[in-house]
Image (cartoon, coloured by chain):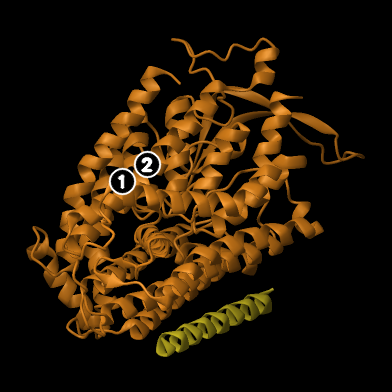
Amino acid sequence: MEWWVCAVSIALGIGTYALYRLIDRLRTAA
Amino acid sequence: MTPFGVVQISLFVAVLMTLAQPLGRYMACVYEGESTWLTRLLSPVERLVYRVAGVDPQAEQDWKRYALAVLAFNCVGLLVLYLLQRLQGSLPLNPQGFPAVSPDLAFNTAVSFATNTNWQGYSGETTMSYLTQALGLAVQNFLSAASGMAVLVALVRGFARTQSTSLGNFWVDVTRSTLYVLLPLATLLAIFLVGQGVVQSFAPYRSVALVEPVTIEVPAADAAGPRVTRSQVVTEQVIPLGPAASQIAIKQLGTNGGGFFNANSAHPLENPTPLSNFVEMIAILLIPAALCHTFGRMVGDPRQGWAVLAAMLVIFVPLALGTYAAEQAGNPRLEAALVDQQASAGQPGGNMEGKEVRFGIANSALWAAATTAASNGSVNAMHGSFTPLGGLVPMWLMQLGEVVFGGVGSGLYGMLMFAIVAVFIAGLMVGRTPEYLGKKIEAFEVQMASLVLLIPCCIVLLGTAIACAVPEAVARVGNPGPHGFSEILYAFSSAGNNNGSAFGGLSANNPFFNFALGIAMWISRYWLMLPVLAIAGSLAAKRTVAVTSGTLPTHTPLFVGLLVGVVLLVGALTFVPALALGPVVEHLQMVHP
């Protein structure tokens, strides 16, 4: 189960960073 | 509804409004770095914190640095809380000898408390050591609340500043929120609660002899079938203790809501008297209401704060009264069975199932509305035992996006996103470029505000749909039919809007719900903070435009009406179909069996 916690946490971290980059791109484009 | 109940609700609103304005002014001084009556006492502590943490309080951050600081700070807090739970069996202050919390529950709880949701898949008194409660959960109560306040302040600075790239310093804002606002208020409230009878102790639990032994039925150990029981005479009761008062004070003020005990604020050692109940209810809404005044002062026009606060009240008061009316009306099926549900000198009447006799109908209904309007989530009655319509209102208050007061900081920044959408719609109607507080609202701001509005809706509806399709999740529902659907919808509405209250009935401590709700809580917190901070950065960089005859005034009753309309329409269009499958069907089954 500990591996699941690691996997989910990493996925959430990557998703959050991807959103951050997307917003930054939109902001730069605006 | 009884006249006495209406008077109590009116008194609550009056006291809340009276206290909110001075606190809002005080917080504006704190965030603008002005001297307050606590500055002499606390500024040495503040400087010490900066020195130890290596923070330069004069260094300003742009939105990206601010956002990364928020995320890094919260991730570290989440990791510490996870490790505390996993290692509590080997750590001190564990007189009951509780073992390590399971990985999935520890993940869920760590995300829950770091995101200011405080959903609890566990019973505090049988799962968490005193160290985990005090050093892990209570500390996160402060820090998650301070994080929300910091993000709000950054957004307000975005409105207030002109052609600037910076939004302030996250480390300064989070320190000042904790030191000057949350700690003093929580200390005062904790002392008051101890005076009312809330426990505050590190002593082990106590066993006491019952005045009158009771006989209970327990499963027989040698039974051939699962339903065979035997009688057992109980002569002793275990009284759980712990450092509860200090945690309860911040759980209410920081709109956290996680109870020290499993029964939360229905437990007599968390909320012993009607007076403690009243003060705790005030504490739930006090900072979110006061922050509206802080906002008005920081943007240089207190009327703007009043307008947002008025919009919140216009939604909150009728819905609170609606819950009260539904609960006081009781259950028509019981009336048909000749059960007396009329309020009288001897009984509160109405639907008292799941409610504490010392609080009655009005204070239970008002708490339910307050705790779901704010993203608090503590409960003094079991929402799953409310009448279908009485339970619908708390659920819908969460689904509105936790913007009616909402969480400390997060509620107001959510409402300001609705304000951006409202001026955008008004601009479309009259054919002018929308402006809010002197800043032009353009495509980027509307895109980001739309993200903030839509992400929680998607989380709630998708999460509910997936759970209804997973047999392991459906098996954890405590009731069949529409009430069972309401249990799942309520759970995802709570997690997907960072509320944390539960409908009861749903056994959520299993891997599916621990992970699914944990993911929902994470996304609905941090995936909203990022666009909010991006809007703040965008607004701060803009110049302030002059007010002209074509500018829509945003402090008038017309704008308040428009804002209320946008909030209610988005909430209704998104969630009425789902609500129709749960509480609405259950109501129809109740009135037309």
Which chain's residue wears label 1? B
Q: Residue at x 60, y 44 (%)?
A: B503
Residue B314, disc: 2
Q: Within 10 angstroms of label 1, few (less than 14), some, or many (20 or more) residues?
A: some
- Is residue B77 visible from the viewing direction of this image? no
Q: How many marks?
A: 2
Tag 1 residue: B310
Q: Position of residue B230 (x, y in %)?
A: 80, 30
Q: Position of residue B131 (x, y in %)?
A: 44, 62
> Hue of chain B?
orange
> Hue of chain A?
yellow
Q: Residue at x 52, y 80 (%)?
A: A16
A18 sits left or right of B116 in the view: right
B390 sits left or right of B282 in the view: right
Quarter residue B459 falls in: bottom right
Check disc 2 and give the amino acid type: Val
Residue B503, disc: none
Front residue of B217/B511: it is: B511
Q: Residue at x 57, y 78 (%)?
A: A12
Distance between the alpha carbons at the discs numbered 1 and 2: 6 Å
B299 sits left or right of B275 in the view: left
Q: Quadrant of the C terminus of chain B?
A: top right
Which chain's residue wears label 2? B
User: Disc 1, disc 2: CB below 8 Å?
Assistant: yes
Tell me if residue B231 comes above or below residue A23 in the rendering.
above
Check disc 1 and give the amino acid type: Ala
